Image: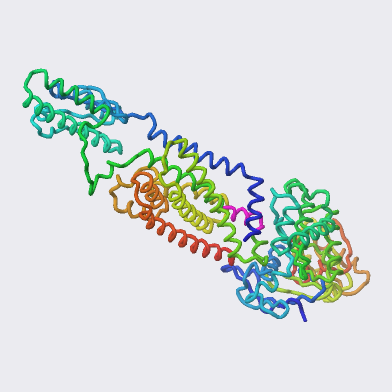
Amino acid sequence: MRTILWLKLRLLKRDYMILVILTAMALLLTGIFGGSMIGKYQPSILVVSEESSLESDRFFELMQTSETFQFEWADQADAIMRVESDEVMAALILPVGFGMDLKSGIAPSISFFQSKDALELMELKNWVRAMVFRMQSDQRMVHFSVENFQGDELGVKVLAEADTHWANKVPVLVHTTTKTTGFFDFYDIKIHYMVGFLLFFSTFSIVFTMADLLQEKKQFTWNRQMISPITKKKILAGNILYSWCLGFMQALVLVGVGGFLFDIDWKAPLAVLLVLGMYILAIAGLGMLITGFVRTLEQLSAITPVILVSFAMLGGCMWPLEIISNPILLFAANLTPHKWALQAVERIVMFDAPIETIGFPILILGTMSLVFFILGLWRFHKHAIS
Amino acid sequence: MNLVEIQGVKKHFGEIHAVDGIDMHVKKGEILGLLGPNGAGKSTTISMIATLLEPTNGTILFMGESIQTNPKRIQEVLGFVPQEIALYPTLTGKENLQFWGRVYGLRSSKLKERISEISQVIGLEERLKDRVDTYSGGMKRRLNIGVALLHKPAFIIMDEPTVGIDPQSRSFILDTVRELRDQGSTVLYTTHYIEEVESLCDRIYIMDHGKIIAEGTKESLTEMIDASEVIRLSVEAVDPMLITTLQELKFVEKAVVEANSIFLTVKENGNHYQSIMNALKESGTELKGMDIQKPSLETVFLHLTGRGLRD
């Protein structure tokens, strides 16, 4: 096995630029694709008010404090036309009685007008709920103050004072214990995209490293190795170890440099690297399995992007699986290493989950590695004897 | 004791019977030639001996032990020169030798010593530090052989090692093979070049369509055909009637057609030419050339199979 590693390092010395380019590309493409989904992109939302009230104006002002969306007033006909033509993502319709409802402490009914589903709409709905909640709280405060202290201008003054406090800190300190929570309350879509794309782009170099076996077959050195005293198991183990080491080194760069470039706080980097280590092993196994099923490098080059992109899509690298409701797709996601790696990393990075919670995903990744390698070895043996 | 014994070995790839029940043996210290046209089953046979392929049926023994149950027995002492250049093109010649030496357990000073010796044998001392992809075809062939000789193998298999190289490198390789035999190694040499087998091999097996069709020394093989000479007639087009007429001549043992040539195996010396010319004239065939050959392995093969080695 050491001899195989010796060979691989010599070959890497000659062709190290390919690995550097692949790593740089993984970072660059993660930046491009991840950035395009989270960067300065601010979908436009129209606000239609069927009444003219201080409350609707204030609601609009509060909505504009969002960093995710940009809002503009529109009349109903214009809003419908622009939503239908996909010029804007959605429109919010404040009904007649919106202000009264707020004053009365009744939850106002706000209509959403949208032409299609989008992940961002969940965030929009959360934002609307938060702002309405804030207005209701403000109203209660005003109501209480006016009732107790009298005076026409007092309510306005209290409201202005409350705004000042909201701007900097929550005016009332509330201690809460959350038993269950909505997924999107804690979900950071930026981290999801960054981790997802890092996982996705890192797979290519790992799979193509395993494909060195096909290169060996093409240049006939594989046959020469097969009839040497080194056993086939040792030759394959050497190749797998090399592929894993290279993949892990790349992961170190991606986690280190990627975290710095994309401003990701990995929270527990060692746990993240443990997950990535198992993920790389599973992807190396997948690479071996694919390599075992194809006969030429050309076939591999054709089939690999299809498999890796499909796995990444199914595994949730491109979008959160939480927005998927199709049971078949959700079942298929369980069969990809991407899903489990992404889930484990997100648990650590987004939810500050204790390290024990990544045990199960790691176990699944380990099992997948084993299955992929066994099937890959079986295919290799079949090729060898035929 | 024979070094290698092959007993009833078959290799089938689906419906294709690449090797169809052969028996052969390799004696220690000899150069054994395996001769046959492309597709005869030579490469499959040596791939099975080298443990690269498993026989469908039959047994291969090395030093009396089955290589199917204990492949390591032969792998440790085998030097295999494949038909293809099996080297790492982006590594230097020295790095290739270092890797393959390590594969066979050579390390540090012993490895250095062997690389130095082998580079002299293959005449590449000056180019060892260059990448293999900068070598000429002949140099790659020589390095391909050098790699197989690093661990001083007792048994060397060479699969058409001279295909596609210049005459100088070819002569160099053939001399190397003789030296190996003189140093006590056993060589199994496959080729479809008659002249290589005739000049090199102590004993020869002739293969065709997956079967051994003849075996012996060059002399014993040529004695197989009861002929004093072979007359080759080059004609514009072969008339089937002419072949019948020629076969009816009493001094003709056999008439075989290969492309636009007719090979007549003639039993005894004598002036047969007038009869042949008469037959040509009768059939209206224009003679373009005629030459007389002593029986050779080429004519043996032609005699046994009815076709040439390079068909």
Q: Using the rendered image of the protein, determine whether residue A275 is visible from the camera's viewpoint.
A: yes
**Residue A137 figure quarter:** top left
Q: Position of residue A234 (x, y in %)?
A: 60, 63
* Magenta-tinted stretch: A211-221
Examine the image and state in which quarter residue B161 appears. bottom right
Q: Position of residue B95 (x, y in %)?
A: 73, 53
Spot the residue most to the top. A153
In the rendered image, which quarter contains the N terminus of chain A?
A: bottom right
Q: Position of residue A83 (x, y in %)?
A: 26, 29
A46 up-or-down from A382: above or below? above
User: Which sits in the foreground, A131 or B292?
Assistant: A131
- Which residue is painted at 77% across and 75% down in the image? B26
Q: Residue at x 71, y 61 (%)?
A: B102
> Which percent across, then down, holds residue A363?
41, 59
| Image quadrant in which the C terminus of chain A is located | bottom right
Vertical placement of residue B288 versus B247, above or below: above
Using the rendered image of the protein, determine whether residue B238 is visible from the camera's viewpoint. no
Q: Looking at the magenta stretch, what is its main secondary structure?
A: helix
Q: Quadrant of residue B63?
A: bottom right
Instruction: Describe residue B175's horizontal placement relative to residue A51 as left or right.
Output: right
Q: Is residue B7 magenta?
A: no
Residue A215, magenta (yes or no): yes
